[in-house]
């Protein structure tokens, strides 16, 4: 079939485009920055960063962590795990990769660009791309753990609850909103100026079906992958009841869930020292390793 000039000059589709060169990091970890994973007509390409684990002597496909950043669905950077981890050296993503994961830190459309369900659709596109390029990357999509903080925790939980093929191995949710339908201080569903309303394109009270679809609490089911829900008990931006109620809904549906509430912790682990944040990170990584290994056994 003859291709038009417009088709010939277009950049290669992310499914087949060349990967950028990898930059070497300590401990054998490699990072590929700004990898396109999706194209949207009339919009910017969607990109991710890839952190690749050290190559073992007997290589086998690695599990994957799909990381989703926070920022009230309005801002944020794909390689930011939050307030306390920004100065870490090695970075949190290097540490996850050094443990054996391939880490994909993804962009998604923010609420000033597109409203829900656009960001969730973008995460599904990222999962699809990781599946298409799995052989080249040396990854096993069946062992993918989604990990998100704040607004990214909200999207991570929804992705884990609504993505079926291949099913995710687990979800790590740090202080993510779980309910966009009912008032939880400081959130008011009648307010059209909240980050939640900007995400939906309307005050949640004026769009109850959409707000329910965007609430992981309303989407809990028995077939959900294992969850680790971690929330500060003194969170002043996303009430700790979000985490508690999400865990209760998952448990009540028959799904596997671990709830860990942190005394003295505000949003973004504000109020904790570095030792406490490192402990949260380490337990989250151990959970991801455990559920990825369990998924390997099930797949085998």
Image: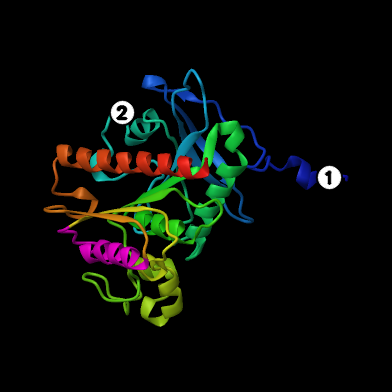
Q: Residue 3 colored magenta?
A: no
Other residues around mark 2 within 10 Å, as few (<14) / some (14–19) / many (≥20): some
Q: Nearer the viewer, residue 212 or 285?
A: 285
Image quadrant of residue 35?
top right
Q: Nearer the viewer, residue 165 or 184?
A: 165
The reply, left or right, for residue 294 in relation to residue 130 is: left
The reply, left or right, for residue 14 in relation to residue 266 is: right
Question: Eyeballing the image, is 27 above or below 229?
Answer: above
Residue projecting furthest to the top: 57
- x then y, percent, for residue 228: 31, 52
Residue 68 visible somewhere in the drawing: no
Question: Eyeballing the image, is 31 above or below 123?
Answer: above
- x then y, percent, for residue 199: 42, 66
- x then y, percent, for residue 61: 52, 32
Q: How far apart are marks 1 and 2 (CA)?
A: 47 Å
Q: Which of 160 and 293 is in front in this view?
A: 293
Please, what is the dominant secondary structure of the magenta stretch?
helix
Residue in the image at 27% along x and 67% along y: 245
Q: Earlier in the sequence, mark 1 or mark 2?
A: 1
- Range of the magenta residues? 233-253
Residue in the image at 53% along x and 57% along y: 164
Looking at the rendered structure, the secondary structure element under dot 1 is loop
Question: Eyeballing the image, is 244 above or below 4?
Answer: below
Residue 152 visible somewhere in the drawing: yes
Q: Residue 247 colored magenta?
A: yes
User: Which residue position holds label 1?
Assistant: 3
- x then y, percent, for residue 88: 27, 32
User: Which residue position holds label 2?
Assistant: 90
Other residues around mark 1 within 10 Å, as few (<14) / some (14–19) / many (≥20): few
| Residue 279 image label | none
Residue in the image at 15% along x and 37% along y: 275
Looking at the rendered structure, the secondary structure element under dot 2 is loop
């Amino acid at each position: 079939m003859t291709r038009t000039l417009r088709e010939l000059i277009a950049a290669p589709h992310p499914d087949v485009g060349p990967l950028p060169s990898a930059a070497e990091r300590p401990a054998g970890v490699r990072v590929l920055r700004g990898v396109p994973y999706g194209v949207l007509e009339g919009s910017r390409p969607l990109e991710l960063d890839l952190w690749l684990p050290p190559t073992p002597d007997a290589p086998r496909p690695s599990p994957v962590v799909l990381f989703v950043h926070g920022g009230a669905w309005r801002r944020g950077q794909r390689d930011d795990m939050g307030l306390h981890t920004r100065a870490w050296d090695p970075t949190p993503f290097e540490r996850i990769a050094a443990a054996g994961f391939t880490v994909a830190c993804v962009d998604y459309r923010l609420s000033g660009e597109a409203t829900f369900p656009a960001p969730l659709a973008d995460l599904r596109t990222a999962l699809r791309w990781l599946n298409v390029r799995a052989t080249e990357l040396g990854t096993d999509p069946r062992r993918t753990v989604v990990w998100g903080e704040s607004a990214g925790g909200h999207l991570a939980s929804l992705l884990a609850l609504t993505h079926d093929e291949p099913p995710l191995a687990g979800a790590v949710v740090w202080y993510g909103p779980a309910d966009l339908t009912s008032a939880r201080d400081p959130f008011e569903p009648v307010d059209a100026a909240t980050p939640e309303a900007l995400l939906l394109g309307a005050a949640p009270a004026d769009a109850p079906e959409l707000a329910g679809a965007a609430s992981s609490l309303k989407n809990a089911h028995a077939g959900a992958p294992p969850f680790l829900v971690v929330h500060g008990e003194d969170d002043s931006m996303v009430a700790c009841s979000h985490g508690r109620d999400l865990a209760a809904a998952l448990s009540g549906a028959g799904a596997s869930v671990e709830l860990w509430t942190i005394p003295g912790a505000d949003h973004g682990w504000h109020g904790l020292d570095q030792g406490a944040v490192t402990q949260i990170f380490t337990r989250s990584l151990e959970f991801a390793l455990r559920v990825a290994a369990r998924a390997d056994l099930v797949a085998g």
